[in-house]
Amino acid sequence: MSILKPIDYSVYLVTQPYRFDQEEAYFAKLEAALRGGVTLVQLREKSLSTRELLQLAQKVKRMTGKYKVPLIINDRLDIALAVEADGLHVGQEDLPVTLARRFLGKDKIIGVSAETVQQAQQAAKEGADYLGVGSIFPTQSKKDATPVSLETLRLIKQSVPLPIVAIGGISLSNIDGLTDEGLAGVAVISAILSADNPEQAARDLLGTMKRINA
Amino acid sequence: MSILKPIDYSVYLVTQPYRFDQEEAYFAKLEAALRGGVTLVQLREKSLSTRELLQLAQKVKRMTGKYKVPLIINDRLDIALAVEADGLHVGQEDLPVTLARRFLGKDKIIGVSAETVQQAQQAAKEGADYLGVGSIFPTQSKKDATPVSLETLRLIKQSVPLPIVAIGGISLSNIDGLTDEGLAGVAVISAILSADNPEQAARDLLGTMKRINA
């Protein structure tokens, strides 16, 4: 499967940490989210061994492939290459975009986390395809995340020509606060994966984003 | 700099974990070891961010390049690619050799940690260039390492046509116990990097290995 740009970033799912004793639940929730219509999946793992991460990424890739949804790997270029993922997401502590691009080629998606206008402009200059900007709201998933104000979000949006995905504590209950920001999408973890009904949660978020961006 | 196979594995230095507050000492010891004659360096880091690891690997590569000694990166194919290292070392929890080979090409060195004949034969079948076998002696560097008996070391040596590097607690004081094993080299950490005089320690180990393999 080859997924060509442009990409639909509207409901961008970031995974929760994988637990070996909850494999069935992990994939059941992921598939529910895909059925509900998430438009992109980022596999984000920080504590697995390389072999474990490879095997997980292969399984996730099969599932996202089934739903024709792009899979982005967080941080690990080696894993992105190994599973032929659709792209890589890098933070400020990960590989530089220019270096990742050299190995991934121009057709893969490269996203960058940016908290400031300077980081956003740097990422744009280096050839990022989109920016993840946050944390917009307080979040349990990344307690040390730097808060990004709506004003900074606007300044970033004005300063770079890239699609912007807002991340951090976003849910149906606060998404209305972002309707005027011209976002390409919202990235969520708990709003879908910790919902009682992940499929419905994904569907509701997608409906809201489509309405906002209509 | 391009380093062609075959490689001199005789004194194979594995790095100690990098500490930001001891950068000067880290590079001073590394350079002393290189002056003393270590024949190969493996950069092994498990807790740095990808960006930190990249920057460290770039610096280490400049230093090993100056001494025309091959640099092998532990586990991280992305970093090996990024810094154009001379090779990659993978453990049983890292990427499979066949996959690493696809991205590194045939000229790069790929080593594999093996503790059993089965693992050694699998690595040989997948195209490993050498095996790291251990832990031969108890070691502080890897307290949970499985001990490998001299008998297993011999069986591995007999079962695969690859250069064998013994690892784990090896020092000048116990290296004589390995003289009959037909080893391509010994991998050490503390024996050089925790020595009062790393340069002399490297030189002594090299002299001993050259004598053994003369």
Image: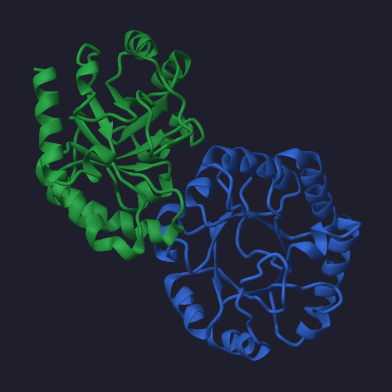
Chain colours: A blue, B green
Q: What residue do we see at 35% from left, 47% from top? A: B80
Left or right of B114 on screen, residue B66: left
Q: From where the camera sits, is residue B37 visible?
A: no
Pick the front one: B87 or B118:
B118
Left or right of B91 on screen, residue A181: right
* Residue B70 sits above or below residue A37 on the image: above
- Name the quarter where the C terminus of chain B is drawn: top left
Residue B34: quadrant of the picture: top left
Left or right of B10 on screen, residue A69: right
Q: What residue do we see at 58% from left, 70% from top? A: A130
Q: From where the camera sits, is residue A34 visible?
A: yes
Pick the front one: B162 or A125:
B162
Q: Position of residue B159 (x, y in %)?
A: 37, 9
Pick the front one: A185 or A78:
A78
* Residue A159 sits above or below residue B125 on the image: below
Q: Position of residue A151 (x, y in %)?
A: 64, 91
Q: Position of residue B174 (x, y in %)?
A: 24, 23
